[in-house]
């Protein structure tokens, strides 16, 4: 496995970096922090024209038919600019779930508009007590005539406040913690009984609370096999984690670059503070940690592209998430500390990246959770 980008991926990275730098400066991100929508529909349409929303979607559904490593390239550049558009919630989760588990009719109905940027899909899989356990589902679905009736509440639904459709996990059999008995349903936002409440996160990534009050859907709303939703969710979230890790890699890289620039320009005792040996050592450690993170993100994305067994993809996805959680937090903390007092102010951009690091660390499980997951997979 070659842990380097192809020539085509380098071109894609340059295009994405120019787009993000030119169309989404951090001043725009700041302005959108308190906005109800939280992103630009115009910019989303432009990203659709570039083909970003359908990178891993086959051409027959309107996508580019490329791979997860290509999507990771775009996600890394998006992370460099803290891009607020719903790549994580709608592309990495919603579109991926329909792609991996949907019937051909569901793919034909939802993937082309998702790729075109005219439909946003969100995955509502977290219940109030589930934490990182995908099988811990308290939302219920019961048979109702020829369809199903869903009742419950989902929290932290990424980009759920703007979603046109939700993929909702609900228990159709068994007890709350049973792995079997979880089913996934496609639910339109405008279905009677669906209540959506915008949530605000410390990292400014938009999310929502979704309440389901006796929401009725047809039998054709089931995604994948009834009662087997946990395994499908795991496959989807493992791939979303790889994309998130790439996004985190971009964020930590920019944080490091900002910090290096400050070390070279800030002077004390008549010399740049970067000449102090203690700060050199801390900067060197950051460089090593970021390069290790880069290697494991590349390994995970290539494994997903090369058709590796799900267990291997899951292991590498967890390794990437654990490594990037630690490295991004370290870059954020060190960046704030090396910037001194100015790093503690909201006006300085380094603080935005630290907030994103804290939010991204917890998304899909923190570093300790994923190290434990790897250990359990390896039989420890």
Image (cartoon, helix red, strand yellow):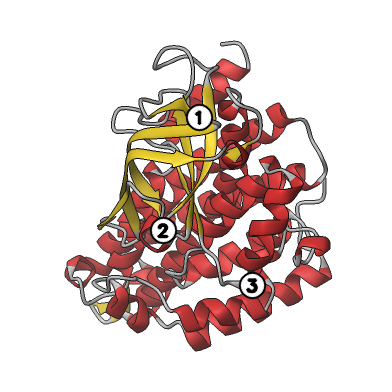
The answer to whether the residue labelled 1 contacts the one labelled 2, judged by CB atoms less than 8 Å apart, is no
Marking on residue 159: 2
- Report crowding for label 2: few under 14, some 14 to 19, many 20 or more residues within 10 A (C-alpha): many
> Label 2, label 3: how many angstroms apart (C-alpha)?
17 Å
> Label 1, label 2: how many angstroms apart (C-alpha)?
32 Å
Instruction: Check the picture and name the quadrant holding the C terminus.
Output: top right
| Labels 1 and 2: the sequence-earlier one | 1
Marking on residue 335: none
The answer to whether the residue labelled 3 contacts the one labelled 1, judged by CB atoms less than 8 Å apart, is no
For residue 70, side relative to residue 214 (left or right): right
Q: Residue at x 57, y 47 (%)?
A: 240
- Report crowding for label 1: few under 14, some 14 to 19, many 20 or more residues within 10 A (C-alpha): few
The spot of residue 305 in percent (x, y) is 78, 48
Instruction: Check the picture and name the quadrant holding the N terminus.
Output: top right
Rendered view: 187 above or below 29: above
Q: Is residue 191 visible?
A: yes
Residue identifier under label 1: 145
Give the structural element (helix, strand or loop) at label 3: helix
| Labels 2 and 3: the sequence-earlier one | 3
Q: Nearer the viewer, residue 307 or 119?
A: 119
The spot of residue 232 in percent (x, y) is 62, 33
For discs 1 and 2, the disc positioned in front in the rendered view:
1
Q: How many numbered circles are shown?
A: 3
Q: Residue at x 55, y 66 (%)?
A: 119
Q: Quadrant of residue 319?
A: top right
The spot of residue 378 in percent (x, y) is 63, 17
For residue 254, side relative to residue 18 (left or right): left
Farthest residue to the front: give it: 145
Marking on residue 116: 3
For residue 329, side relative to residue 117 (left or right): left
Q: Is residue 334 visible?
A: no
């Amino acid at each position: 496995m070659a842990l380097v980008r192809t020539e085509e991926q380098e071109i894609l990275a340059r295009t994405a970096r120019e787009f993000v730098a030119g169309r989404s400066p951090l001043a725009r991100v700041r302005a959108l922090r308190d906005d109800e929508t939280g992103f630009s529909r115009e910019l989303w349409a432009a990203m659709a024209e570039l083909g970003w929303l359908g990178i891993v979607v086959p051409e027959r559904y309107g996508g580019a038919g490329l791979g997860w490593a290509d999507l990771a390239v775009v996600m890394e550049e998006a992370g460099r600019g803290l891009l607020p558009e719903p790549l994580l919630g709608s592309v990495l989760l919603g579109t991926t779930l329909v792609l991996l588990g949907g019937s051909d009719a569901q793919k034909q109905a939802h993937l082309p508009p998702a790729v075109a940027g005219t439909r946003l899909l969100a995955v509502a899989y977290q219940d109030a007590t589930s934490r990182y356990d995908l099988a811990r589902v308290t939302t219920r679905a019961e048979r109702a005539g020829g369809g199903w009736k869903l009742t419950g509440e989902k929290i932290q639904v990424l980009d759920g406040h703007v979603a046109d459709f939700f993929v909702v996990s609900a228990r159709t059999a068994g007890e709350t913690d049973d792995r079997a008995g979880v089913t996934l349903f496609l639910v339109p936002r405008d279905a009677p009984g669906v209540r959506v409440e915008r949530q605000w996160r410390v990292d400014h990534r938009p999310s929502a609370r979704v309440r389901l009050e006796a929401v009725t859907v047809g039998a054709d709303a089931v995604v994948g096999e009834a009662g087997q939703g946990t395994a499908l969710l795991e496959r989807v979230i493992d791939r979303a984690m790889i994309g998130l890790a790439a996004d985190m890699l971009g964020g930590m890289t920019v944080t490091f670059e900002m910090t290096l620039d400050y070390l070279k320009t800030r002077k004390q005792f008549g010399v740049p503070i970067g000449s102090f040996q203690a700060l050199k050592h801390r900067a060197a450690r950051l460089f090593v940690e970021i390069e290790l993170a880069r290697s494991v993100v590349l390994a995970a994305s290539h494994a997903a592209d090369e058709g590796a067994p799900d267990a291997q993809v899951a292991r590498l996805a967890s390794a990437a998430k654990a490594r990037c959680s630690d490295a991004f937090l370290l870059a954020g903390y060190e960046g704030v500390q090396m910037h001194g007092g100015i790093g503690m102010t909201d006006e300085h951009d380094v603080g935005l990246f630290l907030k994103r690091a804290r939010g991204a660390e917890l998304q899909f499980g923190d570093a300790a959770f994923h190290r434990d997951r790897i250990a359990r997979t390896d039989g420890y």
